[in-house]
Amino acid sequence: MAEHASDPDHWKQDRKEGPRHFLDMEAYGGPEHLPRTLEGAQAQLGGDYYRRGVVPWIIQDRWQDLVAAFRTGDPEQVAFATAILGHYIADAHVPLHTTENHDGQLSNQRGIHSRWETGLVERYVQEADLTVSPARPDPAFLGRPWEWLRAAHALVPQLLEDDRVADRTTPMDGRGKQRTQAYWMFLWPKQGPVVRQQLQLAGQHLGDAILNAWIAAGKPRPPAPPAG
Ligand SMILES: [Zn+2]
């Protein structure tokens, strides 16, 4: 699963792939006005809807793939479908995947996307620090992505504010291009708990997705382990 978890990011030479990783909530007038179906999205935005992101519907589709994989009984297919689904579920937990200001380009904070989702994670997060609660059966699972996205979106203003203050408070390097260690040391105590929480929630919700896909597939028995 880990081996294939990043595959969807390598499919972006296909023009249709990019919008599968996010949802620009502002396009719909904010988190309270999100459509539940693609037809609803099209009704609200017309032909423009796809370009503003389709991640909740892609999660639904890839979850159906996982249900189908469980029905085949082939562990390789189950693992692959889980890896792909997990990618989009994780994207839905990244606050900057829920806003048109996805890289801080509208607030003069360009680069914040990778500073938050890569810079902080690579510098400070250890897998051992993350804990995930057990998966839960959930008959309403297919509606959950909208809740995840709304919760992630609510984190955007503070995230941007912390980055602004970190930049204001700490010096850049000589050419004013690279953040210094001081920037990271300022930002981590503010945003670290958020990064960790979102990582844990993404893991927990992937667990929920797997359990509920298995239930939807009729709870197939796992194949016998290979002999020897
Ligand atoms: Zn992605």
Image: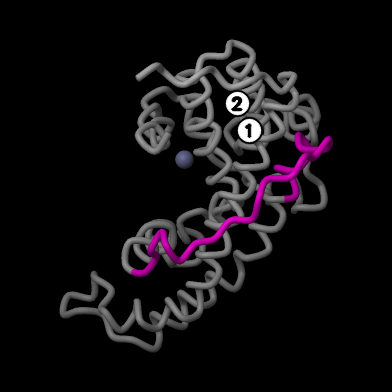
Q: What's the residue at 61%, 36% (across, down)?
A: 55
**Mark 2 → mark 1, Cα distance in angstroms:** 5 Å
- Asked whether residue 125 is drawn in magenta, I would say yes
Judge from the rendering whether residue 203 lies leftward or rightward of residue 137; answer left or right. left
Residue designated by label 2: 62
Secondary structure of residue under mark 2: helix
Q: Residue 59 shows which numbered tag? A: 1
| Residue 2, picture quadrant | top left
> What's the residue type where badge 2 is placed?
Arg
Q: Is residue 48 above or below residue 130?
A: above
Q: Is residue 174 above or below residue 151?
A: below
Q: Quadrant of the C terminus?
A: top left
| Mark 2: few/some/many CA within 10 Å (<14, 14-19, 20+) | some
Q: Quadrant of the N terminus?
A: top left
The number of callouts visible is 2
* Percent coordinates x, y for residue 109 in the rendering: 43, 66
* Percent coordinates x, y for residue 186 in the rendering: 40, 83
Q: What's the residue at 53%, 72% (across, down)?
A: 193
Q: Which stretch did the figure color magenta?
A: 124-147
